[in-house]
Amino acid sequence: MQYHVNGDLVPAEEATVNVRDRGFMYGDAAFETLRAYGGTVFEWDAHIERLRATCEALSIDHGIGDGDLRARIDETLAANDLREAYVKCSITRGVQPGKLTPGPAENPTLVIIVSDLPRGGTEGESVWNVPAHAEVVETRRMPSEAIPAHAKTHNYLNGILARLETEADEALMLDSDGTVTEGATSNLFFVREGVLHTPSLSGPVLPGITRRVILELADEAGIPTETGSYDPGDVRDADEAFLTNTTWEVRPLTRLDDTEFEVGPVTRDLAVAFDQHVESRHY
Ligand code: PMP
């Protein structure tokens, strides 16, 4: 495999960053996990917009143009002959004199990592092998007053602490008031009496790109949606539930703590709608 590091394609085993890079030392960096279907990146505009918002939240003024970034991603995919792929793109504040206060990101570090990720969907196997089990964990989602929830930074300790608490596939996190937010790396949806619910972005919830696409597809399919504030009991009372993220797409949730769910019709319809959406855009 070849990765892109600061403008050069290098063999994966030689892809390194400076030990004084602030992304390594402090998690002072922004990233996006993207996906290529049929050789092109899914929802590029949304990813570039979220990356911009993260960099703005961190005041990382990296000066790398969108077209340049896209070209480097495309180059990395081509160099590895990948059409169905996982793509991770990171921008750090770079190496700076050893103090916490950041200076201007004059030499940002830009790394692109790719790996093979076969397409799930209408023809292939699902990317996830089995539906997910999740557990509500004690670790609370950081308030946006601490680190803005819309910022996708290299500091994933909050999610890591949550995952350490459980052997389930996903850790479901509550905010400091006990309201349901999201999984460590996924957004949560549940269906009750035919209405599709997901926690509102007014709480500390990452604005997932898959989440937004699913809400749009639900609208198109005439499935009523509601974003709101929910407690774990609301989820346990659901008829169906699922998780979304770029790699899992729509992943049914069949157990939350001791509550079991069937993989129901709304989940199935939306998973198919998502596959058809990808099919129509990329193949
Ligand atoms: N929430 C968190 C905390 C995440 O890390 C992710 C993965 N990026 C998501 C939700 C889902 O976002 P997306 O659909 O954009 O992958």
Image (cartoon, rainbow, N blue to C red):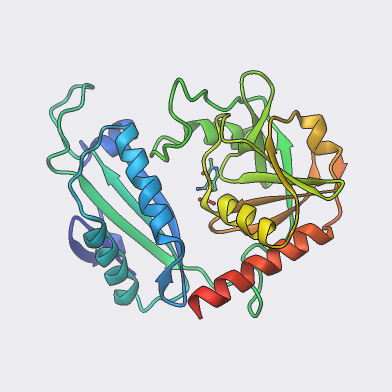
* Quarter location, residue 155: top left
Q: Nearer the viewer, residue 223 or 90?
A: 223
* Residue at image point 84% right, 42% down: 238
Q: Nearer the viewer, residue 83 or 8?
A: 83
* Residue at image point 31% right, 76% down: 78
Residue 163, visible in the rendered structure? yes
Q: Quadrant of the N terminus?
A: bottom left
Residue 11, visible in the rendered structure? no
* Quarter location, residue 257: top right
Side of 193 where 149 appears, left or right: left
* Residue at image point 60% right, 25% down: 140
In the image, residue 242 sits, relative to residue 280, either above or below, namely above
In the image, residue 176 sits, relative to residue 141, either above or below, namely above
In the image, residue 58 sits, relative to residue 112, either above or below, namely above
* Residue at image point 55% right, 30% down: 204
In the image, residue 61 sits, relative to residue 84, either above or below, namely above
Place of residue 191 in the rendered image (x, y in percent of width and height, measured from the top left):
79, 47
Place of residue 5 in the rendered image (x, y in percent of width and height, measured from the top left):
23, 57
Place of residue 218 in the rendered image (x, y in percent of width and height, measured from the top left):
69, 57
Place of residue 137 in the rendered image (x, y in percent of width and height, measured from the top left):
68, 30
Q: Nearer the viewer, residue 15 or 85?
A: 85
Side of 206 where 152 appears, left or right: left
Count of numbered badges drawn on the protein: 0
Side of 240 where 164 appears, left or right: left
